[in-house]
Amino acid sequence: MGATLSPELQRRHGNVRAAMAAHDLDALVVAGSEYSGFEGAVTYLSGFQIVHRYAYVVVPADGEPYVVFPTEARYVGEHGTAELEQVFHDRPGELLAARARDAGWRRVGVFGLDYIMAVRDYRALDLELVAFDVEFDLARAVKSEAELESVRDSVRINERGFEIFFDAYAPGKSAAEVMAAAEEWFVAEGCGRLTMNMVLTGTDAFARPEFKIARREEVLGAFLLPSLEVAGPGMHWVEVSRAIAARDAVLSEDTERMLEAYVEYFEAARSAMRPGASCHDVHRAVSAGFTQRGYRLGHVTGHSIGMTMIEFPKVGEGVETELAENMVFSMHPHAIASSGEDCLYMQDTWLVTADGGVPLSRLPMQVFRAPV
């Protein structure tokens, strides 16, 4: 089976097995679930995209990898896309435990132990389990050229989606009406249901920090912050968005000062996001303009992004993981005024290169003013 795998999948398995060897694992179980939004890890190692229910990819240190599904998932996905042996069982955890005992495995790593693995399967695994979320994410953080092609395609889709959202926007329209125009584009371009698009609204002068679903009853004012996150056909998530205001909107003083800090972050990231820099150092560099102006950051400054929307490492205080060339990060400082009211939040997807950070979107860092 291994000889028939695509070169890209062989590369991914090699990276993961190197991480397993460094932690003395006999096998790795990678959990994925459509229920929780963690489909990407299974696709990353098998080629299979979960349509419904859940699955586990098993990667032995020695031997062929395979993917395990609950029996009821036999006909709720495109199983022809999987490059690995597929196994179906009423209780996948019992099968995993039996195979582990037969193979004499001692230490088994699990990606998804805290948030993804089904409780009934965890209970059946009477083994020495090792939480492996961070290690797995670090093994897949550096993207191949094939992955970067997929990332750039997702950026193209996301960027055009923002432009469509902006063109559809006008004060008085509902958030659902405006978002629907962008969602039509996203689905047509192959995102399917891999979109997570929201809005931050407030008054005509500022937006509040809370993320909201774009519902029909949410009437848009003269200022808003769309939060657009999509994965294209290659299943690589990206995030690209900008603030939007009506032509004559007068923004609050805090919003204007946050915008100044955003421009500074955008320039600082170009030099800070270089191979060898720690995530802590990048966080300090890009957040300096906000903290110096007295603003706090709500959401994380940034994080690695791939086939799962939020991956390790995150860009934040005390995170000493070093950046490497061809890592991809979503950056989105969530600036909040001391009052807890005024907020600014704009998203970019960045590539780490030998010369520093490169934003993959061509959108300028600014508030986009509507013509009406």
Image (spheres, rainbow, N blue to C red):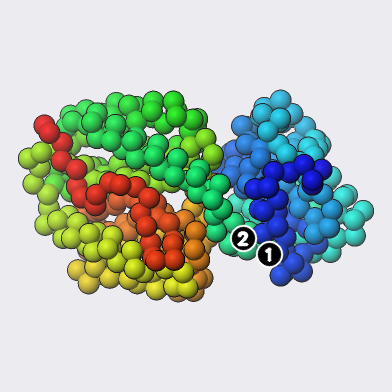
Tell me the residue that label 1 is attached to: 19
Q: Nearer the viewer, residue 14 or 164?
A: 14
Q: Which residue is mark 2?
A: 139
Describe residue 356's horizontal placement relative to residue 265 as left or right: right
Q: Position of residue 13 (x, y in %)?
A: 70, 54
Q: Is residue 277 above or below residue 210?
A: below
- In the image, what residue type sits under mark 1? Ala
**Picture quadrant of residue 221:** top left
Quadrant of the image occupied by residue 338: bottom left
- In this orientation, which residue lies closer to the viewer: 216 or 138? 138
Does residue 325 appear left or right of residue 248 in this picture?
Answer: right
Quadrant including the C terminus: top left
Q: Position of residue 352 (x, y in %)?
A: 44, 61
Mark 2 lies on a secondary structure that is helix
Q: Position of residue 213 (x, y in %)?
A: 36, 37
Q: Give the percent coordinates (x, y) of residue 340.
A: 24, 57
Residue drawn at (31%, 38%) of the image:
162
246 is higher (above) or lower (below) than 281:
above
Kindly indicate the quadrant of the structure image that contains residue 88.
top right
| Amino acid type, residue under disc 2 in the picture | Ala
Residue at 22% across / 28% down in the picture?
173
In this view, the residue farthest toward the right is 102
Q: Earlier in the sequence, mark 1 or mark 2?
A: 1
Secondary structure under tag 1 reads: helix
Specify few, some or many for label 2: CA neighbours under 10 Å numbering under 14, 14-19, or 20 or more. Answer: some
Check the picture and name the quadrant holding the N terminus.
top right
Using the numbered discs, state the Cα–Cα distance from disc 1 to disc 2 in whole angstroms: 6 Å
Residue 238 visible at all: yes
**Side of 330 where 343 appears, left or right:** left
Is the C-beta separation of discs 1 and 2 under 8 Å?
A: yes
